[in-house]
């Protein structure tokens, strides 16, 4: 059974940092891209960051470039999102996901498996 389990969310003040982790199990995902999405109340789920199958290529939504870093460890089948200089507008539920494809795509419909989500709240 495929499982993606996120951890690391919480409450932090603006300017602070959090590190999200996602552990994947049940299948070999080393040939698939992985990504992080977020969904704020009343809004659609949106792409935040992605990493290709090898970990050598990453992509970010413009609003987080220079503040967030995505990484993966295929040996441990984990993907992480280091979030620095957090802002109140980063508040959302964050989801990790495994793509159908080996290259990064920002369309949620390109992602096959999803975690349950972890809440990130940034206070001003």
Image (cartoon, rainbow, N blue to C red):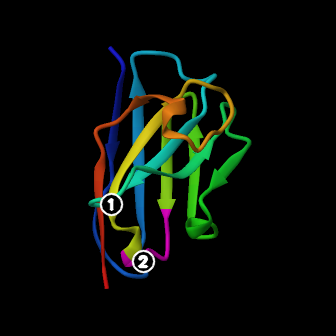
Decide if residue 120 is on the left or right side of residue 22.
left
**Which residue is located at x 58 percent, y 30 percent?**
74
Where on the picture, by quarter, is residue 33? top right
Q: Which mark is residue 48?
A: none
Residue sitting at x 42%, y 58% = 19
- Residue 38: x and y in percent read 40, 53
* Residue 87 magenta-highlighted: yes
Which image quarter holds the N terminus?
top left
Residue range highlighted in magenta? 83-88
Residue 3 against residue 5 in the figure, above or below: above
Q: Residue at x 62, y 42 (%)?
A: 51
Question: Is 6 covered by the magenta stretch?
Answer: no
Is residue 89 placed above or below 119 in the rendered structure?
A: below
Pick whichever, 43 or 112, lies toward us: 43
Q: Which residue lies under the disc numbered 1?
A: 40
- The answer to whether residue 73 is left or right of residue 23 is right
Residue 31 place in picture, x, y as percent? 64, 22
Residue 77 visible, this orientation: no
Q: Nearer the viewer, residue 116 or 85?
A: 116
From the top left corner, tell me how far across and down residue 16 is, in percent: 40, 77
In the displayed image of the protein, which residue is found farthest to the bottom?
A: 124
**Main SS of residues in magenta:** loop
CA–CA distance in space, label 1 to label 2: 13 Å
Q: Residues within 10 Å of mark 2 (few under 14, many from 20)?
A: some
Q: Quadrant of residue 32?
A: top right
Of the pair 21 and 46, the residue shown nearer to us: 46
Q: Which residue is the site of mark 2?
A: 87
Q: Tell whether 113 sits left or right of 75.
A: left
Of callouts 1 and 2, which one flags the residue occurring earlier in the amino acid sequence? 1
């Amino acid at each position: 059974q495929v499982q993606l389990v996120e951890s690391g969310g919480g409450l932090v003040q603006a300017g602070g940092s959090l590190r999200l982790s996602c552990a994947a199990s049940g299948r070999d995902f080393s040939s698939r891209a992985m990504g992080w999405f977020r969904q704020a109340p009343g809004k659609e789920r949106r792409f935040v960051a992605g990493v290709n199958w090898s970990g050598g290529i990453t992509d970010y939504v413009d609003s987080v470039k220079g503040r967030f870093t995505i990484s993966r460890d295929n040996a441990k089948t984990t993907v992480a999102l280091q979030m620095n200089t957090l802002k109140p507008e980063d508040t959302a539920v964050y989801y990790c996901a495994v793509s159908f494809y080996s290259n990064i795509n920002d369309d949620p419909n390109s992602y096959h498996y999803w975690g349950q989500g972890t809440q990130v709240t940034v206070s001003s």
